[in-house]
Amino acid sequence: MRKSVQDLQSMKSNKERIVALTAYDFQTASIIDSYCDFILVGDSLGNVFKGEETTLGVTVDDMIYHGLSVSRGVKNAHLCIDMPFMSYQSSTTDALRNAGKIIKTTKAQSLKLEISFDTIPTIQKLGNAGIPVVAHVGLCPQSFNVYGGYKKQGKTRANQDYILALSKEAEKNGASIIVIEGVPDNLASKITKTIKIPTIGIGAGKMCDGQILVTEDMLGITPSPHPSFVKNYSNMRVLMKKSVGKYKNEVKKNKFP
């Protein structure tokens, strides 16, 4: 049975770290499921799966297609799906319509939103409709053009205060989990200690309640350079090239089949 948001919240209370990874397809999901507490179908599929420079071109239909594929492979972990750029920012009505479509079709258990104070009412609206929200703060890739790239946030005291206040407001309005990306370790630690709901970090130090990485980054499938916070636990890109090269040579020399 999949983990619920309540299960993940209990893990924080019990000081048990949350293991999280991304997945965009059935095969990956079925492999990582038994090792993960939380699996995210991220709009990072725009970068990793579609080869785009940003996540901005990802659509609701993209998220549903990949979310449904992943959902078939997830039996143990909590399944969360990103709401893509402009699927929830224009109005709470649009957000509820798109969120309902994603949840009903994919059978995900929560949705992740890159939040600002303008989208706080959306957290409450979705929660009231029975849709748990994972709030994403710090470096929000959908704001790529505002930042001028994927740049670390929380460098100034004012920005740190903003991110902390936003996290507290998200919790107050019903967010179930907070994802913290690309902020200084001390800020992520302060948020984690201040709020009662779990925090899952990516490039935010070791003091969060859990950690998430893009699976293809962690396995060394995506080409270098990787973000500085990524640790490669394998070098699958090299292994795959060697295997394909061996297959090619055997076909050319008529050794296979």
Image (cartoon, rainbow, N blue to C red):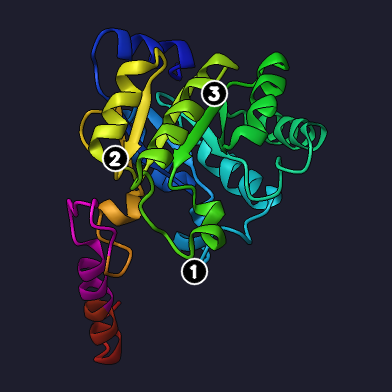
Q: Relative to 59, does residue 127 appear above or below in the rendering?
A: above
Mark 1, secondary structure of its residue: loop
Position of 150 with respect to 121 (left or right) is left
Q: Which residue is mark 3?
A: 170
Residues marked 2 and 3 touching at CB (< 8 Å): no
Quarter of the rendering occupied by the N terminus: top left
Residue name at image x 47 percent, y 35 percent: 162
Magenta region, residue range: 226-244
240 vs 48, nearest the viewer? 48
The span from disc 1 to disc 2 (Cα, nearest Å) is 25 Å
Q: Left or right: 119 with respect to 255? A: right
Where residue 180 appears, as percent x and y from the top left, is 39, 36
Q: Which residue is mark 2?
A: 204
- Which residue is nearer to you in this view: 11 or 146? 146
**Residue 175 visible at all:** yes
The residue sitting at 17% across, 51% down in the picture is 233
Q: Earlier in the sequence, mark 2 or mark 3?
A: 3
- Residue drawn at x 49%, y 53% is 141
Q: Earlier in the sequence, mark 3 or mark 1?
A: 1
Q: Name which residue type carries label 2.
A: Ala
